[in-house]
Amino acid sequence: MRSRKSTSTKRGFLVRKDEGPSLLGLAFSIPPLLLVLIFVGLPILIGLTFSLGFTSGPNRVVSLIGQQIHKKNHWWGTFAAYSDVIHDSRFLGDLGLTLFVTILSTILVILLSLSIALYQRLIGGKKSSLLVTLSIIPLFVPVVISAWAIHTFYGGDGFMRSFFSQFGINFPTLTSTPSAIVIGTVWTSLPFAILMISSGLQGIPDALIESAKDCGASPIRVITNILIPLAKTPIIIATSFTAIGILGSFTIPLFLGPNQPTMLGVEISNFFGSYNRPQQSLVMAFMVFMIASGIAIAYVWSNVKSARESGRI
Amino acid sequence: MKKESDEMGLELRGLKKILGGRVIIDDLDLRVEQGEMISLLGPSGCGKTTTLRMIAGFLTADAGQIMLAGKDVTQLGPDKRPSAMVFQNYALWPHMSAAKNVAYPLKIKGLSKVEINEKVEAALELVKLLHHKDSRPGQISGGEQQRVALARALVQEPDVLLLDEPLSNLDAKLREKVREDIRELQRRLGITTVIVTHDQEEALSISDRVAVMNSGRIEQFSSPQDLYRHPATEYVATFIGSLNRFEGELVDGQIRSGEGIVGIRPEDLVIAQNYIEGSHQGTVELVIPRGHFYEIVVRRHDGLFRAFMNENVPALGESVHVGIKKSLRYHNGKLVA
Amino acid sequence: MKRVSIGRVAINIGILILAFFILGPIVWLAVHAFASDWKYPNLYPSGISFHWWSKVFLDSALATAIRNSLIISPIVVVISMIICLPAAYAAGRLNYPGRKTFMVGIFSANSFPKIGLFAAIATLYYALNLMGTFLGVVIVQLLGTIIYMTWIPAAAFAAVPRNLEEAARDAGASKFRVFRTITLRLAMPGILVAIVMSFLASFDEAQGSYLVGAPSIYTMPTEMYSLVQNYPIQVAAVFSILLAIPSVLLLSLARKHIMGGQLAEGFQLK
């Protein structure tokens, strides 16, 4: 057999050195990019102009239908709608609740995932697989169902109250309280966080743990000095995805939360639909987006940093 | 860190390990002198790594006793044992610099910052890597990573140093140099050292004594010269170096059918153009240049003989005389004196 | 030894609490689907009955929603694959300017709050006459699948060892054949996970489909919104079970790969 001289290039067969940067790659990435630009980028851009008081052009129809529309009074627009929202005590209450739920639920989800994943990594066995499998189950359940199931479980005539009333205990009705939103968001966010963190921890070679033990490290030290720093990227990804997801959540607070204050996801929908104040609704969306972007930047930054450290960039 | 000479550096007594229902290590005894460097040598699956991991404390022994520098450590975890290990893939923590890796065990011991700094620098100096102290493991070569791992082990001032296949991940050129460096360092520090390896050349060249292991037992534990010249079992004879192995007995310089095994080292054969005492004739079947010597294979009426030659190398097909200077005889696998 | 048994008791309690927290609500809801009547504070129903099931199947609005969902979601997944998989291959394997920006852009588009996007999208939908149309619902659901269909397969394509492809090339296979028989096959687990996640994202999508589709097009999840208000809990329970069937089937199919890290691998920027 004719043996060709080494064909091994570090990159793939489609990228030979003489080909340089691939135009094919650019062409391939255009369709999804166009879709996102037209149906995400463009609406957001139009929405941004609308929130700033540009009421003509594509915003004409919605300006005619909506109430309390502010028209621009500078060349760049107006902040009147933003001012409306910021001075709305209702919005401030919603924002407070949204941040409270996002922070509390994210902390709970990450702590829970981390402890289960650490248990699985350090001790392992059937019980740890059982814990992980249990935590993944919510991934199998559409969020509308989860929300409704949790509603019936913790609601006025739900299981918790039925069960405790057998012993004459009056268990509180949790639905329509922030507690129920936290329960719901933790329930639905758990699988992704567990998958991320457990796969990150499983990827750490045994030898790195053993060498620490050999140096005299206690289990706590192994966790804080070795395992958590090495799984930092997956943990940050899990944290930011969880936080962004909860921040923009709609169905869970709609089914489980109180009417007032409610989470911003529900309020955006209320302002758009029920109250017919589309401009204010969009202003809220941009505020949520700004918070989410902050979290997303942390995620991207951590990703890039870890790639640089391991020499991938 | 010299200890009184009457206590052993490392002692294993009746060690036993069962994994997944299989006996991996069976009733293993080993006594290593203080300051001695020994190798556990054997093919994969012979139990050498299991033994090392039991000494380090990553596996608990199912029976038996482990003594490190006179102390019984059988019940202690790896963090409590006075041993330090250099892992096969070095197991450096990628998120810490070389200096941080080396400092880690000292930080756990609760030493002061000044003391840690001093010792880390000294340890990195020892392995000649001070200039890389702020590099991350991903930024330095495999050989340098190994030296960091060595520094991290030495800085703990262990009673026993454990090396798991220390050279297997280095390329051939570097291997010889690192081997000498390790040996030199170990002599200078006088530290009891156990190396696990599957490479006989490595084991023979670096160790005071070598324990050849086979299916969970130690076949022979002696000096490299002894292992080669006086292999106690047939297994050791064939495992170490090359051997002309025949079934039968040696009578009048010829192999005759009979009980037992005859083993002849290639250098114990004499190849000559003409008859010398006790030699028999044969034909050269193969001549293989091996750099500074030739390996030649001669067919005699009683079998194939493999020998090494430097000069007067016969040609293929030539008729030569083969004489036997020295042979080993084994019965039921054991050396017969 | 005593410490060990305390740890064991603690972990058993932990498993019980987690099982109760996760399974409790689903089981409680599922049981309702077979209950004739259930009065608070009873822990069990007054009787067992299947008549809620026939009620769901005979209700034309609910049946239409089921049909819509089963038609729309596969279409969405196929379109998503056609649009995104080449881009995923490019992002995982090819070298072109703006590759990272593309990936990060897709990601940040996903971090805009969905409900806000759907509010903003209305303007465009009115302009393009997409409001209340089948295509409109398909596009809204498509948006939620893009991140899965690009990121996860991109990681899977990137992870295919180059020397396996080169060995096949060396054995005489054409570029296309290598792609089909080696690259695609080895990236398949990741693509499978992406398909499953995309299907679920589309099938479970409720907010956008409701805003864009109602009142002319209802899918199963959007029907749930009105269902829980207008029907007894048992009907919602039956409907929930029906809605959960595709998820459970698909996820158990891809469970090995999802738990095996394909999903987690997919979201690490390379």
Image (cartoon, coloured by chain):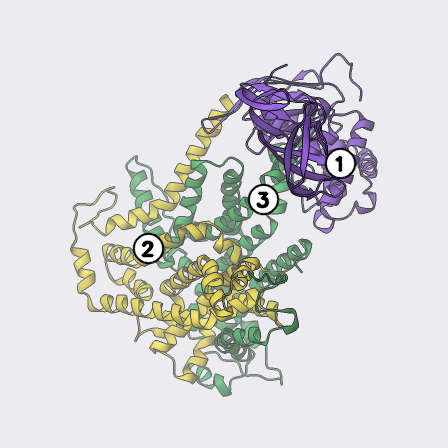
Chain colours: A green, B purple, C yellow
In the picture of the structure, the residue carrying the numbered disc 1 is: B179
Kind of residue indicated by mark 1 = Arg
Kind of residue indicated by mark 2 = Leu
Residue A213 occupies quadrant: top right
Asked if disc 2 and disc 1 are in contact, CB closer than 8 Å, the reply is no
Disc 2 element:
helix
> Looking at the image, which residue is at 37% across and 52% down?
A175
Front residue of C19/B211: it is B211
Q: Where is residue C32 in the image (x, y as percent from the top left)?
A: 24, 50
Disc 1 element:
helix
In the picture of the structure, the residue carrying the numbered disc 2 is: C249
> Looking at the image, which residue is at 26% across and 54% down?
C237
Q: Nearer the viewer, mark 2 or mark 1?
A: 1
In the picture of the structure, the residue carrying the numbered disc 3 is: A204
Front residue of C4/B1: it is B1
Alpha-carbon neighbours of circle 1 within 10 Å: few (<14), some, or many (≥20)? some
**Label 2 to label 3, Cα distance in Å?**
32 Å
